[in-house]
Image (cartoon, rainbow, N blue to C red):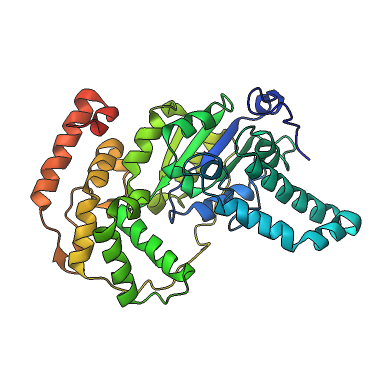
Amino acid sequence: MGPDFSLGAEAPSQAPFDRIESLFFGIGAQKAGTTWLHDYLHAHPDVVVPQIGVGSKELHYWDSVRPPYRTRYLDMVRARQQQRRWRNLAIRLIGDRAQRDRERQWALYAEALRDGGRSHARYLELLFFRWQGQRAVGEISPAYGLLDRETFAEMAALSRKTKFVYVMRDPVDRLLSGLRFQLQKSGQPVTSENLTAALRRAVEDDPDLALARSQYRETISRLESVVPPERISYHFFETLFAQEELDRLTAFLNVVPRRGDPDKQVHVGAGKDALVPPELLAQARALLDPTYILIGARFGTRVPAAWDCTGQRVFHGAALRRSKHRRRSFRKAIRRLDRRGWRSLNRPR
């Protein structure tokens, strides 16, 4: 069992933090390789990540106890504990050490969510439950990418060693993968017809909500307004599985390098052959133009070529409109970045 955080969030015991190199949070993006990354870090001998929660990895703690205050995760944990109450009693009486430890972690998880963020003691106890001197401790919940700046500041204040990891994927590709995932979760077949209808709803009915997870510039702006850039590591889904990129991550976390398995596939979605009209793709691409432009200006050659930040990609033979305008916008963004720095790209004009 890990250290005691009984002093709570107001003045948490610094002893465990003094003995680790990184307290990290993976904040997304959704459908950008975060499950693969969680599995990679879980297998690392110098890293501790939880093995409980949504999908056995996502705690959803901060988006439950802080805006947008999602209550469904507490409801989920309560329902689980209620359904397993007799089984849990038997485990406490005659279960083995691994079973008791796992149920203790679920109990800590429930206590942390019930506390509502008044004290982060139980949450930190859960994060450190399996800690035995490893150099890095953390969790990955892609929904954290939508948190507000005040919550990012609170997370950063937990320790001077708090760090953030953010993985981005081509915004339109991430949107389509997310829509396929939602169709699967709802029990609908991922056909061209269903995917087209879902994308049309996303770009026409409520684009602000539907596209939020692909608008990385907004997440970066909120995060960097309260967290020093040296405590943030940015990565791209398209290059995440390369050993060079994994070495960048382990160096950032101050743990020894470790080889990954680029061929391992997790959460492979159905419906990869489902097609949507090129005009609808172009409409989604146009709505996400600011993200392409600003990420391209910010990260330059690190952005994978598949992102097509200058807007010259062809979707199934249909050229995107306004490509000249996009190239001009991209060049202007680069010039502004050179003159005034990254934060200027997010200021109203």
* Residue in the image at 26% along x and 71% along y: 276
- 93 or 245, nearer to the observer: 93
Vertical comparison of 198 with 61: above or below: below
Vertical comparison of 115 with 58: above or below: above
Vertical comparison of 136 with 291: above or below: above
- 14 or 21, nearer to the observer: 14
Residue 250 placed where, x, y %?
54, 39
Compared across the picture, whether 53 is left or right of 169 comes to: right
Q: Report the number of numbered marks.
A: 0
Compared across the picture, whether 168 is left or right of 143 comes to: left
**Quadrant including the C terminus:** top left
Residue 13 placed where, x, y %?
70, 24
Most distant residue in the right direction: 94
The quadrant in which residue 320 appears is bottom left
Vertical comparison of 93 with 279: above or below: above
* Residue in the image at 69% along x and 42% along y: 126
Compared across the picture, whether 341 is left or right of 48 comes to: left
Compared across the picture, whether 49 is left or right of 157 comes to: right
Residue 342 placed where, x, y %?
28, 30
Does residue 36 show up?
yes
Does residue 46 show up?
no
Residue 294 placed where, x, y %?
25, 40
- 342 or 209, nearer to the observer: 209
**Quadrant including the N terminus:** top right
* Residue in the image at 45% along x and 33% along y: 232
